[in-house]
Structure formats: C-alpha cells, structure tokens
Image (cartoon, grey):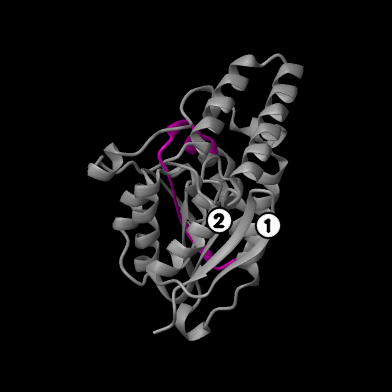
Amino acid sequence: MTEVVAPEAGPATSQVERLFSGSIGAEYHMLDLICPAAAAMSKRVGDFVASLSFDAANCQTSLSAFEIGCGTGTTTLGLLESRRGLTILAADNEPAMLSQAQRNLSRFIDEGRLRLVETDALTALRELAANSQHVVASAYAVHNFKDSYRDLVLTEIFRVLRPGSMFVNGDRYALDNIAGQTRLTQEEAHGYFKVFSAINRFDLLEQWVLHLFSDESADHIMRLSPSLEKLREIGFTPVEVHFRDGVNTLLSATKPAA
C-alpha cells in the first residue's frame, strides 16, 4: 500500500491548529452519533460532483480533484464513487485520521486514483499549479479554520481551479442571526450530552464540547452571508447555495471561464 506523504513543515503549517488530536480524532466515527447530517452531507458533495458536466476536450479522460481536510475518508469515498475518471489529492494535517483514511480507501490508493498527503490545506494548495484542478471539494473542514487562514485558503482555491471549474463545499455555515445561531448551538450541545452520557463517554463529551466552542468562537465562526460575499470578492461567480438545513449547507463557487 502506498504510504501517506508528509511534506516538510513550512510557515503555513506552523500556524495551523490541530483540532482533532487525541480521542476526538482517533474515534471520529462518533461524529455519526452526534451529527448524522455530516455523513449525509458527504454523500451530497459526492452526488453534486457526479452531476457536474465537463468539457471532454478540456478534461480528456480524467478529472483532477483536490480535497481539503479528508479526515477518515468519508467524503473522499463519495467523491471517488461519483465519477470513475476522478483522481484525488486529499490533504489532512491529523495523522490519526489519515491512517484511518489510508485503511478505509486502500483500494483506491492501490489503483492510483487517490493520494493522501499529511499537511494543512494552504501548504498543499500552494504546491499545486495554477489552473490545474477540475474540482476542489470539502466537507466540514473549512469552518475549522481561523478567518485569516480561511481567506488565504479560499484565494488559493481560486488560483488552482481551472477556468469554469468549481469549489464544492458541504459545511457548517452559521446563521447570520446571532440569537438564532445561539439557539442552534445550545440544542447541539444538549444533543452531545444526551448521546455521550448514554454511552458513558464523558471524555469524548468534553472534547466535542470544547470543539463546539472553537467552532463558535469569534475568530472561527463562518457565517453564511459574509462567507458568500468573501467568495465573490475573491472572484468566484456564480456563488450558489444548493442545500441549507440549520447550519448544514452545500454551496458551490465557480471560477469564471476565461
């Protein structure tokens, strides 16, 4: 089996938070219990990419995709199964989760359709050539970034996409209404307590509650309207929301054709 590639750390890597170290990353499958919408969103991302049409003369026989924050490979699998001609470079900076992805997706690695890299999103994107990717995709990763880092990542996504190609993101986009978002967050925390208390996993309860606080912090929270406007400022058009249920959102942002 092909080993996970781990590029040397650079300035960007040193500034990136590792929010899934320890038990939260080692038992990431627990997310299915507290957020079933996450698995459903991974499928939505794959289904959306499957629905895209590409210029045959432009893409020849294969499509190149870059995935941000592949984690254990749930969204990666949805993407790989969406199109036979899709090859993916998937990046994540958490070794425990990448090792799970390597096991879960070994068939695709052996077939040469998937390469995993242990690094942060910005470092990986900066290694890619301009106008080289047919798709950049992600699910529940970009919201984890601090605002300033996220802006750099989005700018690099625009650079590496081919003209006419898309960034597809299924993610946690907070409500613009602060009171409404607070209510949803309280309900989410209540659900964590209910699930983890029932299975006597207070260690995981603590980790996920701390992670939720990080998601909602001022320098992390990714509200919908400002996020859409930022994508437009970078140059994406159109920017479209295809699904929205609470904070769970699927959107696409297109790099205009030359």
* Residue 85 is a magenta residue: yes
> Which of the two discs, 2 and 1, labels the residue nearer the N terminus?
2
Name the residue carrying label 2.
224
Residue 72 image point, x, y percent:
55, 40
* Residue 129 is a magenta residue: no
In the rendered structure, are the residues bearing label 2 and label 1 in contact, judged by CB atoms less than 8 Å apart? yes
Element under label 2?
Answer: helix
In the image: residue 195, left or right of residue 164: right
Q: Is residue 203 visible?
A: yes
| Amino acid, disc 1 | Arg
Residue at position x 37%, y 55% in the image: 151
Alpha carbon distance from label 2 to label 1: 10 Å
Residue at position x 69%, y 49% in the image: 246
Residue at position x 40%, y 42% in the image: 4
Residue 68 image point, x, y percent:
46, 51
Q: Which residues are magenta?
A: 84-100
Assess disc 2: are there few (<14), some (14-19) or many (≥20) residues with their C-alpha within 10 Å of its C-alpha: some
| Amino acid, disc 2 | Leu
Residue 120 image point, x, y percent:
37, 44
Say which quarter of the image contains residue 32.
Answer: top right
Instruction: Work out which residue is located at the far left of the displayed protein and give it.
Output: 11
Assess disc 1: are there few (<14), some (14-19) or many (≥20) residues with their C-alpha within 10 Å of its C-alpha: some
Residue 167 image point, x, y percent:
49, 64
Which one is in front, 209 or 126? 209
> In the picture, which quadrant includes the C terminus?
bottom left
Q: Is residue 83 visible?
A: no
Say which quarter of the image contains residue 192.
Answer: top right
